[in-house]
Image: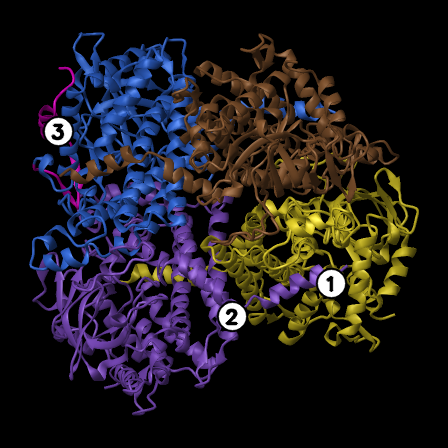
Chain colours: A brown, B yellow, C blue, D purple
Amino acid sequence: MPAIDGLTFLKRVRDLKAEVWIDGQKIKENICEHYAFKGLIKSKAKLFDLQLEKDFMTYQSPLTGERVGSSFLIPQSKEELEIRRLTTQEWAKTSGGMMGRSPDYMNTGMMALGAAWEEFQDTANRGVNIQKLYEQARENDLTISHTFVNPQVNRSLGYFEDDDAPISARVVEENKDGIVIKGARLLATQGGITDELLVLPVGGKYIEEPFIYAFSIPSNTENLKFICRESFAYRSSPFDHPLGSRFEEMDTIVVFDNVLVPWERVFLYKDYSIVTNMYEETHFYAFLLHQTVARQVIKTELLLGVAQMLVDSIDIGAYQHVQEKISEIIAGLESMNALLLKSELEAKLDKRGVMVPEPSPLFAAITSYPQLYPRFIEILELLGASGLISIPTEEDFHSDIRPDLDQYLQSVSCAALERTKLFRMAWDICLSSFGGRQRLYERFFFGDPIRLKSGLYNSYPKDKAIELAKSMLAKE
Amino acid sequence: MPAIDGLTFLKRVRDLKAEVWIDGQKIKENICEHYAFKGLIKSKAKLFDLQLEKDFMTYQSPLTGERVGSSFLIPQSKEELEIRRLTTQEWAKTSGGMMGRSPDYMNTGMMALGAAWEEFQDTANRGVNIQKLYEQARENDLTISHTFVNPQVNRSLGYFEDDDAPISARVVEENKDGIVIKGARLLATQGGITDELLVLPVGGKYIEEPFIYAFSIPSNTENLKFICRESFAYRSSPFDHPLGSRFEEMDTIVVFDNVLVPWERVFLYKDYSIVTNMYEETHFYAFLLHQTVARQVIKTELLLGVAQMLVDSIDIGAYQHVQEKISEIIAGLESMNALLLKSELEAKLDKRGVMVPEPSPLFAAITSYPQLYPRFIEILELLGASGLISIPTEEDFHSDIRPDLDQYLQSVSCAALERTKLFRMAWDICLSSFGGRQRLYERFFFGDPIRLKSGLYNSYPKDKAIELAKSMLAKE
Amino acid sequence: MPAIDGLTFLKRVRDLKAEVWIDGQKIKENICEHYAFKGLIKSKAKLFDLQLEKDFMTYQSPLTGERVGSSFLIPQSKEELEIRRLTTQEWAKTSGGMMGRSPDYMNTGMMALGAAWEEFQDTANRGVNIQKLYEQARENDLTISHTFVNPQVNRSLGYFEDDDAPISARVVEENKDGIVIKGARLLATQGGITDELLVLPVGGKYIEEPFIYAFSIPSNTENLKFICRESFAYRSSPFDHPLGSRFEEMDTIVVFDNVLVPWERVFLYKDYSIVTNMYEETHFYAFLLHQTVARQVIKTELLLGVAQMLVDSIDIGAYQHVQEKISEIIAGLESMNALLLKSELEAKLDKRGVMVPEPSPLFAAITSYPQLYPRFIEILELLGASGLISIPTEEDFHSDIRPDLDQYLQSVSCAALERTKLFRMAWDICLSSFGGRQRLYERFFFGDPIRLKSGLYNSYPKDKAIELAKSMLAKE
Amino acid sequence: MPAIDGLTFLKRVRDLKAEVWIDGQKIKENICEHYAFKGLIKSKAKLFDLQLEKDFMTYQSPLTGERVGSSFLIPQSKEELEIRRLTTQEWAKTSGGMMGRSPDYMNTGMMALGAAWEEFQDTANRGVNIQKLYEQARENDLTISHTFVNPQVNRSLGYFEDDDAPISARVVEENKDGIVIKGARLLATQGGITDELLVLPVGGKYIEEPFIYAFSIPSNTENLKFICRESFAYRSSPFDHPLGSRFEEMDTIVVFDNVLVPWERVFLYKDYSIVTNMYEETHFYAFLLHQTVARQVIKTELLLGVAQMLVDSIDIGAYQHVQEKISEIIAGLESMNALLLKSELEAKLDKRGVMVPEPSPLFAAITSYPQLYPRFIEILELLGASGLISIPTEEDFHSDIRPDLDQYLQSVSCAALERTKLFRMAWDICLSSFGGRQRLYERFFFGDPIRLKSGLYNSYPKDKAIELAKSMLAKE
């Protein structure tokens, strides 16, 4: 089955029946109808319909000749890189970039791993496994969640866990069928509502053997549990919570309660020589960042649009400080976009014939965005001011109080209802629990900002700059 | 009836029955039990009990000799200013400074106006009215809401409203019983659940006659309506929403639907010579700022405490960047505190024998806090990181999943339950809808930050500094 | 005479004999030997030699077929835009971008005006004049200074000058030979040492008739005076002041003491319809910005190189906060570079067949750099710390004290002499009077940063963003 | 001899004849007349005259009953602390706080050590030595330079120096007359022109035995050399360089070329138990910070004065962004001042009966100022803009060009000459080499800002804040 439609997607999620806990309850009903998930799942279903509508969003499978999603495309030219970007941005537009884990995110990761399957070849031939997992995902348009983060028990330097009662998920047994995992992982976004869960080793210089593994398993694998945080879809009215009601993605703690992972799904095991450089060698980060920055560009565009609409609605565009604030968003948008384009302009073919975006501009973008995004949110708050507080709800507009609202909440350029819709969206971006999580996510989207900056420092080629500085010294 | 206890307060709110609209419904039940209000009202009731417990929180009424609340005290010495500060801070501690409109806030405003009643003396003897309103509030321990802000229809320069269909509340009639008000005001926090509503003229250089008025009326006055925004008390569990469940104050739009204000409650009317300088002459701002900064000091102390507890819980205190971040909060706390003390140290008796805190340091504080508070929130987010996301709810701890939580969410220094409580509080400060509103409020607590800065620029005595600069020029 | 060599340049400056005042004296000697100018003039001479060495730095004159400088090239393709960029950067490398007014700067301006000469066509056929002035400059490799800024008498809104005693330069007479100018202009960098002075109208919405003019005249025109500020070439030793001794450009006040400008040199006169949009219509800003950002990229590269060399010299590269700081420069460099490339990628042919770089990314760059550059200077200061203070001079190394210096100023990776050279360069970038002026210049390079931001706000196409925001509102 | 006058001071400096190297030469002439020193020495002489003029600036010596300088006063009450502050500020006003090492700075240090002499008591009775050194300084009004910083050879963690060829000054021998020191110290400001040089151990957790020493010796001690950096007194005209010509303090590298320090001048030697906590136990930092912050308050006041004069001179005070910028300086000034006062308000008597200012607010101030000061400089640059560049010199005003200057540099509120004086001072604060050093100094005045913040983090009592946070958790 190639690229699917929304209905197929909905049916698949309904039938998945992974073990998902929320508010102290295991979900037993159809999860597509559950208050905490229905908005997101509906929004995702639309993505699949959209994918079938736009030609460039699918391509011919090299395996079957059928149309498969372009987010699975292994790019071999700059044009194909551009198709990947356009695909991501087309989807991102439907949520204004608010769905951080739209399917293309981990499809991209899977693509990078699959394209570089030879990097995982070991004595047990495990490279072939990731190649198959990738193809399977592509041919069936599978959705994938993943986990990167270990429990945050202790972040001090030099802390190592005790062996007896695993906290971080680890291999506790190996047998003829596969490996057995026990322990937890934090922060699988959309955990339990994707077809698969991709489990990758957590980075860091020192990694012990029981933590060297990588695999992908169905979300409904036995003994696999997903524990949800509180849902931020507090209201299902898109009028009241225009974003939260539709794009609340949910984050889960993943518990592996002695989960058996079959050998054919394991593509890395105990091989220290592979794990050390796997993310660099597969260009996993370069590709994920290309998708991420493409999405962040759209998100920034949304912020600019909302900001300008706020400005127009209360007619403050002539104030100098307002112009300064908007111009700051514009400069940020242009920079993010320019860095994205530069990564494509400077893309290079790797030894496998894959066109890899240049990572430096992408790393520059991803180390900047954790400052830019919160600043832009601040600008929205400063522009919206008290108008972001006194905003009635959909039901108020359907009540006897409506004439008062129409009169007292009108704005210079639009009626009270339109104005309220706009300010509620601004509120949902800046101030709601949904918006708060978005802000936190952009701060940490690609991990600890401090570590990201160290990464950029260490990887960036500085020779040309040093040469220039030296030439200035030598001159007399 | 002097300083009241919590029970009396509860009874009074129950009996008030002001016209309050929420979610498209007029509230008919006991508002003390309403999901959106019960947390706050309960928290306020405790304030009154506390007031009776602590000696310094009450003083002998000059009128009756009975104990009345110290937030009504007209200070005549620096010691009495200190008592006012301690009173505010004692109350603020119960909410960590999160209740921006605890009763002492507007009590303070009422006190300033009452103490300076002579400023309002006009041909109709209206100064006496505010003096009586103040005494009444003091002797009955009334709670007061107020409104400062006009609807945000159009913020462009040089915009004036049309006369026919008032938007901003204005006098539309005057008769033998009083004046009739029609139109709206934005942003009466706790509107409809306080005994009185104090309505003051909106500042600005150009004010037209129909907008020159000031009065206080009972919240249940006929034709007075309060329209609530969505409640952020999404969950009533203090475990899940430790702040939102207890301190969500609610903001309302106030609609005056031809409200008759009796003459004896009007203390300013059409007198341009009074309205121009009334806030300066009554030291209204100086006293409100003294209360505000005192509360912000407590709030900052809470942020420091929570930040340090986060640090300890995951043992990251040895990291240099963590130490830098916490030291930034400390420096902010020390500065706010120092500015508060300086305002008392430099306080002066006015012509009426009232000890007025020096406004400059308070204005310095209030122009800094709109940057400091969001920065401290950012620091909490950077410290808590992904730990602020995967936080289960109270019900999860009462379910079969608990052993997993106990194991996987434990931290180096505390059990999963304690850690979860801590992180939920941090989340409620930083990331929840409740926390979002707090951040927006501190940005704008005393009005538009840009205007505040202009105010400081214009009022600050710069002679000494210029003299110093000139002396440097003259020197050879 | 086509592209010239350094010697020709030197001879020309020597023979120019413009009226230049410095330290209360009119310069009478050979200005090429004057302490305040010799370093710069020598550095400029080298630019001309370099231009002849590199093929891409010249092209065939369409008029004569001889080689002329590529900074005069009217680009008709993206490739030619790239040649322009490479030319600018090749020159910029010789000064690490510290020569803000290398010849290509105003050559670029002249090129933009000359290419768009038809915009200046009026009843007196003045468009032809600028076309000729451009060709003359190109064919003779003339150097050009210019002035944009009126005296800073009064910057309040709504200030207009008195007519009788002109302060800002204005037309005071017109006769058969030309127009007569009286008054001053501020800030002609390198004033009096370039062949020509290009005088352009100062922007702004309201411009009175006597200020509507544009022309180019030889610097040694009668009654034209250049008054220098203090020279920052305090020491001529490139060891002691590696930048100031070589790249101090000098700024001058230009006094027009009834200067007669011949008609054939006037290309704009009293025509309000031309002056209003001349900078937009000629793409003057777009081309100047393209040159400016290209130079700023090189300058940023120098800062990165120096920063990294400081880090290496005292071996602090392992500190996290050091890595963060350097990564900040890297991200800035990548962004500036990406914006520059984007402006070329999105360049479009105008109606005249000129390939014009897209201005939005360039404006984004130029509104960011006034923050970036001072921040990078701050980073250098924080990295160099006390090492930027205790730095001996060239003469110290030639004295008996040298063994002490060799011992006590050695660093982990280099000898005391090398280390001192490096730190002196860092000092000259950050802390010297020369460096101070550089910082001020980058803050204001393209004019008032606030006005630049308003410009970006007003010119940026925001429709796509608003459309996106609206699509999010409409969704339900 | 008690508090001295300026003439006595001048004579003493003249007769000192320490070994001072500058520009590759050993100074042989009267240093008071040397171009690099004469401005500063003259400015210091005035301080001594001023001290005799103002009663509160001296007090009765407990030893002799004669008047001695109040900067030597061991405070025993808050009133005496205030006298200390006033004394510092009175002196600071003469240089606008630009003389970082006015005599009261190290007098204060000497006072702290002397008052706590018992802390240095060891088996050799060395506490008595510092007591005597202190008394000697007080009774003779000695000026003192000091050194804190080791050469910056290698700043990586875990670097230890080789023993054989000392770089950092260390004890290389001990004999009956004293100890012999070999090696260097960086950054003795005013080295070689003060009576004494106080040498203190460099902080840090790990200190090796040869580095555990403290002493004070005359600057003209045999084998002691001071190597100057380049002088920034480029011009001696107070018109041209109003600050640099008068307050350029000079920094020196101190070379100990086997300097014999007599036993009676050594007050710490090889005693690890003393060195570890000596700065805390003597309240050395608390007192130095009290002096420093008092000076920084004056400096900030100067910046405010200059900023406001710039604003007035070009009449830009009505612009909102200008008001914001000035209000930022005001808020900083108020905060610094408030923290200073808080440190006195919360001062406590130590076990020796000395009134010690509370260190926390002072540390808060000193961790803030390294950001505040550069930001205020930035504000001055943004206000002065291009006006900070085109500023003529004194000689220009004495030349034929003067009429042009008078006409074209006049400003709305003052004549060209006055305006030029003002802008030259602003330039000397912001942009000159002198100003650059000032900025670097304020960044690092009390050492590495990162370490300062760690210090504040570690020393600040956080219990109250944690208690408050816990009380919020417990509540239900």
Asked whether C196 or A283 is in front, the reply is A283
Camera sees residue D368: yes
Residue at position x 42%, y 61% from top?
D452
The residue segment tinted magenta is C1-29
Residue D342 numbered tag = 2
Q: Are marks 1 and 2 in contact (CB under 8 Å)?
A: no
Of the residues shown, which amino acid type is indicated by label 2? Lys
| Residues beneath discs 1 and 2 located on the same chain | no
Of the residues shown, which amino acid type is indicated by label 3? Val
Picture coordinates of residue B93, whole percent (x, y):
69, 64
Q: Is residue C421 left or right of residue C340?
A: left
- State the separation of the CA atoms marked 1 and 2: 26 Å
- State the separation of the CA atoms marked 3 and 2: 63 Å
Camera sees residue B129: no
Q: Are marks 3 and 2 in contact (CB under 8 Å)?
A: no
Q: Is residue A206 left or right of residue B238?
A: left
Q: Quadrant of the C terminus of chain D?
A: bottom right
Q: Quadrant of residue A307?
A: top right
Let me know if residue B201 is in the magenta part: no
Q: What is the chain identity of the residue bearing mark 1?
A: B
Q: Is residue D264 left or right of residue D299?
A: left
Q: How many marks?
A: 3
